[in-house]
Amino acid sequence: MIKKHEIYKTDKWNMMTVEVQGRYIVLREISDQWGEETHTFLSRPAMMQWVNNRFNKDSYKDNEEEYKNIIAAFKQV
């Protein structure tokens, strides 16, 4: 059973989805700058470590609400 979560989506090119496929967590990041990147994690703590490195709080000083929404969406996976 695959459970799909949409983390954020600004348009059809800038989005991030997470699929829980059994014991694997597959994260797909699509951007207009880099194309599509896929990351596979074996645990939620490993995914959250990647999230904290990818979305550091200093980058979202001007938009802290967006940062909180992204982190909350990942925690619900």
Image (spheres, grey):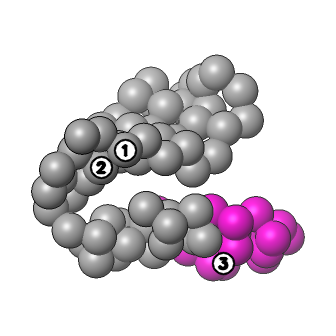
Span shown in magenta: 54-70
* Horizontal side, residue 70 vs residue 51: left or right: right
Residue 64, horizontal then vertical, whole percent: 79, 74
Viewed as shown, does residue 35 lie left or right of 24?
Answer: right
Horizontal placement of 9 versus 29: left or right?
right
Q: Which residue is mark 1?
A: 3
Identify the disc placed on residue 20: 2
Write the residue at 34% across / 75% down.
49
Residue farthest to the top?
12
Task: Estimate how packed mark 2 is, as few (under 14), some (14 to 19) or many (20 or more) residues with alpha carbons within 10 Å.
Answer: some
Q: Residues within 10 Å of mark 1 (few under 14, many from 20)?
A: few
Q: Secondary structure at mark 1?
A: strand
Give the residue drawn at x 64%, y 21%.
Answer: 12
**Residue sitting at x 40%, y 28%:** 36
Q: Earlier in the sequence, mark 3 or mark 2?
A: 2
For marks 1 and 2, give the CA distance: 5 Å
Question: Residue flagged by tag 2: what amino acid is it?
Answer: Val
Would residue 11 be visible to someone looking at this image?
Answer: yes
Q: Toward the viewer: 59 or 70?
A: 70
Q: Which residue is mark 3?
A: 58
